[in-house]
Image: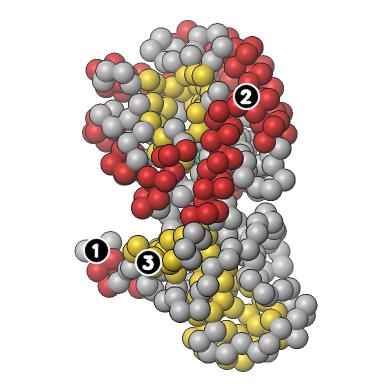
Protein backbone atom coordinates (compact mmCIF):
# COMPACT_ATOMS: atom_id res chain seq x y z
CA UNK A 1 0.00 0.00 0.00
CA UNK A 2 1.16 3.51 -0.70
CA UNK A 3 3.36 4.99 2.01
CA UNK A 4 1.73 8.42 1.73
CA UNK A 5 -1.68 7.26 2.91
CA UNK A 6 -2.68 7.25 6.53
CA UNK A 7 -3.61 3.68 7.29
CA UNK A 8 -6.28 3.46 9.91
CA UNK A 9 -5.94 0.77 12.59
CA UNK A 10 -9.13 -1.24 12.92
CA UNK A 11 -10.48 -1.52 16.47
CA UNK A 12 -9.53 -4.64 18.39
CA UNK A 13 -12.31 -7.18 18.00
CA UNK A 14 -12.19 -10.76 19.13
CA UNK A 15 -11.84 -13.77 16.86
CA UNK A 16 -15.03 -15.63 16.01
CA UNK A 17 -15.09 -19.37 16.57
CA UNK A 18 -16.34 -20.48 13.15
CA UNK A 19 -15.19 -23.57 11.29
CA UNK A 20 -14.61 -22.25 7.76
CA UNK A 21 -13.05 -25.48 6.48
CA UNK A 22 -15.76 -26.58 4.09
CA UNK A 23 -17.43 -23.30 3.26
CA UNK A 24 -17.71 -21.96 -0.28
CA UNK A 25 -15.75 -18.78 -0.89
CA UNK A 26 -15.83 -15.83 -1.12
CA UNK A 27 -18.38 -15.53 1.66
CA UNK A 28 -19.34 -13.12 4.41
CA UNK A 29 -20.28 -14.99 7.57
CA UNK A 30 -22.13 -13.17 10.32
CA UNK A 31 -22.15 -14.78 13.75
CA UNK A 32 -25.48 -14.66 15.57
CA UNK A 33 -23.85 -14.88 18.98
CA UNK A 34 -21.61 -11.86 18.35
CA UNK A 35 -24.53 -9.92 16.89
CA UNK A 36 -26.72 -10.64 19.91
CA UNK A 37 -23.86 -9.54 22.21
CA UNK A 38 -23.74 -6.16 20.42
CA UNK A 39 -27.50 -5.82 20.42
CA UNK A 40 -27.68 -6.55 24.16
CA UNK A 41 -25.25 -3.67 24.80
CA UNK A 42 -27.36 -1.35 22.65
CA UNK A 43 -30.59 -2.49 24.31
CA UNK A 44 -28.99 -1.71 27.67
CA UNK A 45 -28.18 1.82 26.42
CA UNK A 46 -31.80 2.22 25.41
CA UNK A 47 -33.11 0.96 28.75
CA UNK A 48 -30.77 2.86 31.04
CA UNK A 49 -30.54 5.98 28.85
CA UNK A 50 -34.29 6.03 28.22
CA UNK A 51 -33.54 6.70 24.56
CA UNK A 52 -34.11 4.91 21.28
CA UNK A 53 -31.40 3.25 19.20
CA UNK A 54 -31.92 2.77 15.46
CA UNK A 55 -29.89 0.69 13.02
CA UNK A 56 -28.42 2.93 10.28
CA UNK A 57 -28.88 0.76 7.20
CA UNK A 58 -26.09 2.51 5.32
CA UNK A 59 -23.64 0.58 7.52
CA UNK A 60 -25.33 -2.80 7.73
CA UNK A 61 -28.42 -3.89 5.83
CA UNK A 62 -28.37 -7.69 6.04
CA UNK A 63 -32.13 -7.97 6.15
CA UNK A 64 -32.30 -11.68 6.92
CA UNK A 65 -31.17 -10.58 10.39
CA UNK A 66 -33.66 -7.71 10.80
CA UNK A 67 -36.05 -9.90 12.85
CA UNK A 68 -33.23 -10.52 15.34
CA UNK A 69 -32.18 -6.86 15.37
CA UNK A 70 -35.80 -5.79 15.80
CA UNK A 71 -35.98 -7.83 19.02
CA UNK A 72 -33.54 -5.34 20.57
CA UNK A 73 -33.59 -1.99 18.72
CA UNK A 74 -36.35 0.55 18.07
CA UNK A 75 -36.14 0.65 14.29
CA UNK A 76 -33.95 1.79 11.43
CA UNK A 77 -32.42 4.97 10.03
CA UNK A 78 -32.56 5.25 6.24
CA UNK A 79 -30.74 7.50 3.80
CA UNK A 80 -32.95 6.89 0.79
CA UNK A 81 -36.30 5.55 -0.38
CA UNK A 82 -34.79 2.10 -0.97
CA UNK A 83 -33.43 1.86 2.58
CA UNK A 84 -36.65 3.19 4.09
CA UNK A 85 -38.68 0.65 2.15
CA UNK A 86 -36.39 -2.20 3.19
CA UNK A 87 -36.69 -1.13 6.83
CA UNK A 88 -40.47 -0.93 6.61
CA UNK A 89 -40.79 -4.27 4.80
CA UNK A 90 -38.31 -6.30 6.79
CA UNK A 91 -38.41 -4.87 10.30
CA UNK A 92 -41.49 -2.67 10.48
CA UNK A 93 -40.61 -0.73 13.61
CA UNK A 94 -39.73 2.99 13.57
CA UNK A 95 -38.38 4.18 10.23
CA UNK A 96 -36.46 7.46 10.08
CA UNK A 97 -34.93 9.06 7.02
CA UNK A 98 -32.37 11.76 6.43
CA UNK A 99 -30.92 12.67 3.03
CA UNK A 100 -28.88 15.72 1.96
CA UNK A 101 -31.69 16.55 -0.49
CA UNK A 102 -35.03 15.03 -1.50
CA UNK A 103 -36.61 14.89 -4.88
CA UNK A 104 -40.32 15.74 -4.72
CA UNK A 105 -41.71 12.53 -6.23
CA UNK A 106 -39.46 10.37 -4.06
CA UNK A 107 -40.47 12.25 -0.92
CA UNK A 108 -44.09 11.56 -1.84
CA UNK A 109 -43.36 7.84 -1.49
CA UNK A 110 -41.15 8.31 1.54
CA UNK A 111 -43.71 10.13 3.67
CA UNK A 112 -45.96 7.09 3.45
CA UNK A 113 -43.19 4.85 4.80
CA UNK A 114 -41.43 6.81 7.52
CA UNK A 115 -42.10 8.10 11.04
CA UNK A 116 -39.41 10.81 11.00
CA UNK A 117 -38.07 12.80 8.07
CA UNK A 118 -35.02 14.99 8.57
CA UNK A 119 -34.20 17.84 6.22
CA UNK A 120 -30.80 19.28 5.44
CA UNK A 121 -31.78 22.91 4.74
CA UNK A 122 -34.56 25.40 5.27
CA UNK A 123 -34.95 25.79 1.51
CA UNK A 124 -35.78 22.07 1.13
CA UNK A 125 -38.04 22.18 4.16
CA UNK A 126 -39.99 25.14 2.84
CA UNK A 127 -40.26 23.78 -0.68
CA UNK A 128 -41.46 20.36 0.47
CA UNK A 129 -43.21 20.91 3.80
CA UNK A 130 -46.66 20.67 2.25
CA UNK A 131 -45.97 16.95 1.69
CA UNK A 132 -45.03 16.50 5.33
CA UNK A 133 -48.11 18.35 6.61
CA UNK A 134 -50.32 16.13 4.47
CA UNK A 135 -48.95 12.91 6.03
CA UNK A 136 -50.51 12.13 9.38
CA UNK A 137 -48.29 11.37 12.37
CA UNK A 138 -45.08 12.16 10.50
CA UNK A 139 -42.49 14.12 12.50
CA UNK A 140 -40.07 16.44 10.70
CA UNK A 141 -36.66 17.57 11.88
CA UNK A 142 -33.70 19.61 10.71
CA UNK A 143 -30.11 18.41 10.57
CA UNK A 144 -27.75 20.95 12.05
CA UNK A 145 -24.00 21.20 11.70
CA UNK A 146 -22.36 22.20 14.98
CA UNK A 147 -19.10 22.95 13.09
CA UNK A 148 -17.17 21.01 15.70
CA UNK A 149 -14.82 18.40 14.22
CA UNK A 150 -13.86 15.21 16.04
CA UNK A 151 -12.99 13.13 12.95
CA UNK A 152 -9.38 13.33 11.76
CA UNK A 153 -9.96 12.10 8.17
CA UNK A 154 -11.67 14.84 6.08
CA UNK A 155 -13.44 12.25 3.88
CA UNK A 156 -15.39 11.14 6.96
CA UNK A 157 -15.80 14.49 8.73
CA UNK A 158 -19.32 15.94 8.31
CA UNK A 159 -18.30 19.01 10.34
CA UNK A 160 -15.29 19.90 8.15
CA UNK A 161 -15.14 23.47 6.78
CA UNK A 162 -17.37 23.83 3.71
CA UNK A 163 -19.43 20.73 4.55
CA UNK A 164 -22.82 20.43 2.84
CA UNK A 165 -24.21 18.34 5.70
CA UNK A 166 -26.49 20.18 8.10
CA UNK A 167 -27.45 23.81 8.71
CA UNK A 168 -24.75 25.86 10.41
CA UNK A 169 -25.66 28.23 13.21
CA UNK A 170 -25.37 31.38 11.07
CA UNK A 171 -27.87 29.96 8.56
CA UNK A 172 -30.27 28.53 11.12
CA UNK A 173 -33.67 30.25 11.24
CA UNK A 174 -35.31 29.79 14.60
CA UNK A 175 -38.14 32.00 13.29
CA UNK A 176 -38.89 29.45 10.53
CA UNK A 177 -39.17 26.34 12.68
CA UNK A 178 -42.92 26.02 12.73
CA UNK A 179 -43.79 22.41 11.84
CA UNK A 180 -40.37 21.08 12.85
CA UNK A 181 -40.36 18.95 16.00
CA UNK A 182 -36.75 17.80 16.16
CA UNK A 183 -33.07 18.44 15.55
CA UNK A 184 -30.48 16.00 14.20
CA UNK A 185 -26.72 16.15 14.25
CA UNK A 186 -24.20 13.63 12.98
CA UNK A 187 -20.53 14.49 13.31
CA UNK A 188 -18.81 11.38 14.63
CA UNK A 189 -17.16 8.34 13.06
CA UNK A 190 -15.88 5.37 15.07
CA UNK A 191 -15.63 7.56 18.17
CA UNK A 192 -16.08 7.31 21.92
CA UNK A 193 -18.45 8.90 24.42
CA UNK A 194 -15.84 11.60 25.14
CA UNK A 195 -16.20 12.85 21.54
CA UNK A 196 -19.98 12.90 21.94
CA UNK A 197 -19.67 14.82 25.20
CA UNK A 198 -17.57 17.57 23.56
CA UNK A 199 -19.88 17.68 20.54
CA UNK A 200 -23.00 17.87 22.66
CA UNK A 201 -21.62 20.85 24.58
CA UNK A 202 -20.98 22.76 21.34
CA UNK A 203 -24.32 21.70 19.84
CA UNK A 204 -26.25 22.85 22.91
CA UNK A 205 -24.41 26.15 23.05
CA UNK A 206 -24.84 26.91 19.32
CA UNK A 207 -28.44 25.80 18.95
CA UNK A 208 -29.82 26.74 22.38
CA UNK A 209 -32.77 28.81 21.07
CA UNK A 210 -33.80 26.04 18.64
CA UNK A 211 -33.63 23.43 21.40
CA UNK A 212 -36.33 25.35 23.26
CA UNK A 213 -38.73 24.62 20.40
CA UNK A 214 -38.34 20.89 19.77
CA UNK A 215 -39.45 17.58 21.25
CA UNK A 216 -36.64 15.28 20.14
CA UNK A 217 -32.97 15.27 19.19
CA UNK A 218 -31.17 12.66 17.11
CA UNK A 219 -27.48 12.33 18.05
CA UNK A 220 -26.68 10.60 14.71
CA UNK A 221 -24.23 7.72 14.31
CA UNK A 222 -20.50 7.20 14.61
CA UNK A 223 -20.77 6.03 18.23
CA UNK A 224 -18.55 2.96 18.56
CA UNK A 225 -20.67 1.71 21.44
CA UNK A 226 -19.89 -2.00 21.08
CA UNK A 227 -16.13 -1.62 20.88
CA UNK A 228 -14.61 -3.26 23.97
CA UNK A 229 -13.09 0.01 25.28
CA UNK A 230 -16.20 2.18 24.72
CA UNK A 231 -17.39 3.90 27.89
CA UNK A 232 -21.04 2.82 27.81
CA UNK A 233 -21.77 4.23 31.28
CA UNK A 234 -20.58 7.66 30.17
CA UNK A 235 -22.88 7.53 27.14
CA UNK A 236 -25.83 6.53 29.31
CA UNK A 237 -25.05 9.34 31.74
CA UNK A 238 -24.73 11.88 28.88
CA UNK A 239 -28.09 10.89 27.45
CA UNK A 240 -29.81 10.81 30.85
CA UNK A 241 -28.35 14.17 31.79
CA UNK A 242 -29.43 15.72 28.48
CA UNK A 243 -32.93 14.34 28.89
CA UNK A 244 -33.12 15.54 32.49
CA UNK A 245 -32.01 19.07 31.62
CA UNK A 246 -33.91 19.44 28.36
CA UNK A 247 -36.89 17.14 28.71
CA UNK A 248 -36.41 15.90 25.13
CA UNK A 249 -36.55 12.46 23.53
CA UNK A 250 -33.18 11.19 22.33
CA UNK A 251 -32.39 8.97 19.36
CA UNK A 252 -29.07 7.40 18.41
CA UNK A 253 -28.58 5.90 14.95
CA UNK A 254 -25.34 3.93 14.81
CA UNK A 255 -24.63 1.57 11.92
CA UNK A 256 -21.18 0.19 12.54
CA UNK A 257 -21.79 -0.43 16.27
CA UNK A 258 -24.48 -3.00 15.48
CA UNK A 259 -22.22 -5.14 13.28
CA UNK A 260 -18.79 -4.40 14.76
CA UNK A 261 -16.86 -7.63 15.28
CA UNK A 262 -19.77 -9.80 14.15
CA UNK A 263 -18.63 -11.07 10.77
CA UNK A 264 -15.76 -12.27 8.63
CA UNK A 265 -15.01 -12.49 4.94
CA UNK A 266 -13.54 -15.82 3.96
CA UNK A 267 -11.53 -15.97 0.73
CA UNK A 268 -9.42 -18.64 -0.98
CA UNK A 269 -5.99 -18.45 -2.55
CA UNK A 270 -6.33 -18.98 -6.32
CA UNK A 271 -2.72 -18.48 -7.42
CA UNK A 272 0.69 -17.43 -6.20
CA UNK A 273 3.07 -15.41 -8.40
CA UNK A 274 6.34 -13.60 -7.81
CA UNK A 275 7.36 -10.03 -8.69
CA UNK A 276 9.95 -8.83 -6.19
CA UNK A 277 7.64 -10.24 -3.51
CA UNK A 278 5.43 -13.33 -3.33
CA UNK A 279 1.90 -12.36 -4.36
CA UNK A 280 -1.21 -14.39 -3.56
CA UNK A 281 -4.24 -13.89 -5.82
CA UNK A 282 -7.47 -14.31 -3.88
CA UNK A 283 -11.05 -14.97 -5.00
CA UNK A 284 -12.02 -11.61 -3.50
CA UNK A 285 -11.18 -7.98 -4.19
CA UNK A 286 -10.27 -4.97 -2.07
CA UNK A 287 -12.08 -2.56 -4.35
CA UNK A 288 -15.20 -4.67 -4.97
CA UNK A 289 -15.66 -6.51 -1.66
CA UNK A 290 -13.95 -4.43 1.02
CA UNK A 291 -13.78 -0.93 -0.50
CA UNK A 292 -13.01 0.85 2.78
CA UNK A 293 -9.64 -0.91 2.80
CA UNK A 294 -8.74 1.41 -0.10
CA UNK A 295 -11.05 4.31 0.67
CA UNK A 296 -10.43 4.85 4.35
CA UNK A 297 -7.81 3.29 4.07
CA UNK A 298 -7.25 0.57 6.67
CA UNK A 299 -5.49 -2.73 7.06
CA UNK A 300 -7.85 -5.59 7.87
CA UNK A 301 -6.82 -8.18 10.40
CA UNK A 302 -6.40 -11.70 8.98
CA UNK A 303 -6.67 -14.62 11.39
CA UNK A 304 -3.24 -16.13 12.02
CA UNK A 305 -1.36 -13.55 9.89
CA UNK A 306 0.89 -10.68 10.92
CA UNK A 307 2.79 -7.68 9.66
CA UNK A 308 5.43 -8.33 6.95
CA UNK A 309 8.36 -10.14 8.53
CA UNK A 310 6.50 -11.02 11.72
CA UNK A 311 6.14 -14.62 10.52
CA UNK A 312 8.56 -16.37 8.10
CA UNK A 313 6.47 -16.14 4.90
CA UNK A 314 5.34 -12.76 3.60
CA UNK A 315 2.86 -12.27 0.75
CA UNK A 316 1.14 -9.39 -0.94
CA UNK A 317 -2.57 -10.21 -1.10
CA UNK A 318 -4.24 -9.12 -4.29
CA UNK A 319 -7.75 -9.17 -5.73
CA UNK A 320 -9.42 -10.25 -8.93
CA UNK A 321 -10.07 -6.94 -10.66
CA UNK A 322 -7.93 -5.10 -13.20
CA UNK A 323 -7.23 -2.24 -10.78
CA UNK A 324 -3.46 -2.23 -10.19
CA UNK A 325 -4.11 -1.10 -6.65
CA UNK A 326 -6.57 -3.89 -5.89
CA UNK A 327 -4.26 -4.96 -3.11
CA UNK A 328 -5.32 -5.69 0.44
CA UNK A 329 -1.83 -5.39 1.86
CA UNK A 330 1.31 -7.32 2.74
CA UNK A 331 0.91 -10.02 5.39
CA UNK A 332 3.15 -12.70 6.83
CA UNK A 333 2.16 -16.26 7.69
CA UNK A 334 3.74 -19.00 9.81
CA UNK A 335 3.79 -21.39 6.83
CA UNK A 336 3.84 -21.10 3.04
CA UNK A 337 0.49 -20.30 1.48
CA UNK A 338 -0.88 -22.91 -0.87
CA UNK A 339 -3.52 -22.76 -3.54
CA UNK A 340 -6.87 -23.51 -1.94
CA UNK A 341 -5.91 -22.09 1.48
CA UNK A 342 -8.63 -20.07 3.15
CA UNK A 343 -7.98 -16.66 4.63
CA UNK A 344 -10.33 -15.20 7.19
CA UNK A 345 -10.60 -11.40 7.19
CA UNK A 346 -11.87 -10.21 10.50
CA UNK A 347 -14.62 -7.64 11.05
CA UNK A 348 -16.08 -7.54 7.56
CA UNK A 349 -19.81 -7.26 8.29
CA UNK A 350 -20.24 -3.46 8.24
CA UNK A 351 -19.71 -1.15 5.27
CA UNK A 352 -18.89 -4.14 3.02
CA UNK A 353 -22.08 -5.84 1.75
CA UNK A 354 -23.72 -2.41 1.49
CA UNK A 355 -20.87 -0.90 -0.54
CA UNK A 356 -19.96 -3.81 -2.80
CA UNK A 357 -19.76 -3.49 -6.54
CA UNK A 358 -19.59 -5.98 -9.39
CA UNK A 359 -16.67 -4.14 -11.01
CA UNK A 360 -15.09 -6.37 -13.68
CA UNK A 361 -18.05 -8.72 -13.24
CA UNK A 362 -16.35 -10.19 -10.19
CA UNK A 363 -18.88 -12.29 -8.30
CA UNK A 364 -20.19 -10.86 -5.06
CA UNK A 365 -19.39 -12.90 -1.93
CA UNK A 366 -22.17 -15.15 -0.68
CA UNK A 367 -23.79 -14.21 2.63
CA UNK A 368 -24.03 -16.73 5.47
CA UNK A 369 -25.18 -16.89 9.08
CA UNK A 370 -23.31 -18.85 11.74
CA UNK A 371 -25.21 -19.96 14.82
CA UNK A 372 -22.82 -20.71 17.68
CA UNK A 373 -25.59 -22.60 19.51
CA UNK A 374 -25.32 -25.57 17.13
CA UNK A 375 -22.29 -24.42 15.08
CA UNK A 376 -24.46 -24.43 11.96
CA UNK A 377 -23.52 -22.38 8.93
CA UNK A 378 -26.36 -21.37 6.62
CA UNK A 379 -25.72 -19.64 3.29
CA UNK A 380 -28.66 -17.23 2.92
CA UNK A 381 -27.66 -15.64 -0.38
CA UNK A 382 -25.56 -16.58 -3.38
CA UNK A 383 -24.83 -14.20 -6.25
CA UNK A 384 -24.24 -14.94 -9.88
CA UNK A 385 -24.34 -13.68 -13.41
CA UNK A 386 -27.91 -12.33 -13.10
CA UNK A 387 -26.90 -9.95 -10.31
CA UNK A 388 -24.20 -8.49 -12.53
CA UNK A 389 -26.48 -8.33 -15.59
CA UNK A 390 -29.43 -6.80 -13.79
CA UNK A 391 -27.49 -3.77 -12.59
CA UNK A 392 -26.86 -2.90 -16.23
CA UNK A 393 -28.89 -2.57 -19.36
C1 LIG B 1 -26.67 10.70 9.14
C2 LIG B 1 -25.94 9.46 9.54
N1 LIG B 1 -26.46 8.69 10.52
C3 LIG B 1 -25.85 7.55 10.91
C4 LIG B 1 -24.68 7.12 10.33
C5 LIG B 1 -24.07 5.82 10.78
O1 LIG B 1 -22.77 6.00 11.22
P1 LIG B 1 -21.92 4.77 11.80
O2 LIG B 1 -22.11 3.61 10.93
O3 LIG B 1 -20.51 5.30 11.77
O4 LIG B 1 -22.41 4.55 13.20
C6 LIG B 1 -24.10 7.90 9.31
C7 LIG B 1 -22.84 7.47 8.67
O5 LIG B 1 -22.31 8.08 7.81
C8 LIG B 1 -24.75 9.10 8.91
O6 LIG B 1 -24.26 9.84 7.92
* Helix, strand or loop for disc 2: helix
**In front of the other: label 2 or label 3?**
3
Whichever of labels 3 and 1 marks the residue nearer the N terminus, that label is 3
Query: Hey, which quadrant is residue 392 in on the image?
Result: bottom left
Residue depicted at 50% across the width and 79% down the height: 21
Between the residue at mark 2 and the residue at mark 3, the CA separation in whole angstroms equals: 39 Å
Between the residue at mark 1 and the residue at mark 2, the CA separation in whole angstroms equals: 45 Å
Q: Which residue is mark 3?
A: 379
Query: Hey, which quadrant is residue 47 in on the image?
Result: top right
* Helix, strand or loop for disc 3: strand
Q: Which residue is mark 2?
A: 239
Can residue 104 be seen at all in this image of the molecule? no
Residue 238 x %, y %: 67, 25
Query: Hey, which quadrant is residue 363 in on the image?
Result: bottom left
- The answer to whether the residue labelled 2 contacts the one labelled 3, judged by CB atoms less than 8 Å apart, is no
Quarter placement of the N terminus = bottom right
Amino acid sequence: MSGTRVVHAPPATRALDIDVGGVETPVYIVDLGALRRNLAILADVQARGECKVLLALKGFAMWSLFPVIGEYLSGIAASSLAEARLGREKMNKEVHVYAPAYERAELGELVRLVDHVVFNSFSQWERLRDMVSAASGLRAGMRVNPQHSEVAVPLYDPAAPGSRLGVIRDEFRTDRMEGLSGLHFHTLCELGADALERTLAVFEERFAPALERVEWVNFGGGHHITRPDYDVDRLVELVRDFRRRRGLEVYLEPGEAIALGTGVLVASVLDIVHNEIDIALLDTSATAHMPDVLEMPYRPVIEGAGLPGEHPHTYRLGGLTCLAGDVIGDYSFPRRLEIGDRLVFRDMAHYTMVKNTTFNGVRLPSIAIHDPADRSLRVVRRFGYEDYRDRLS
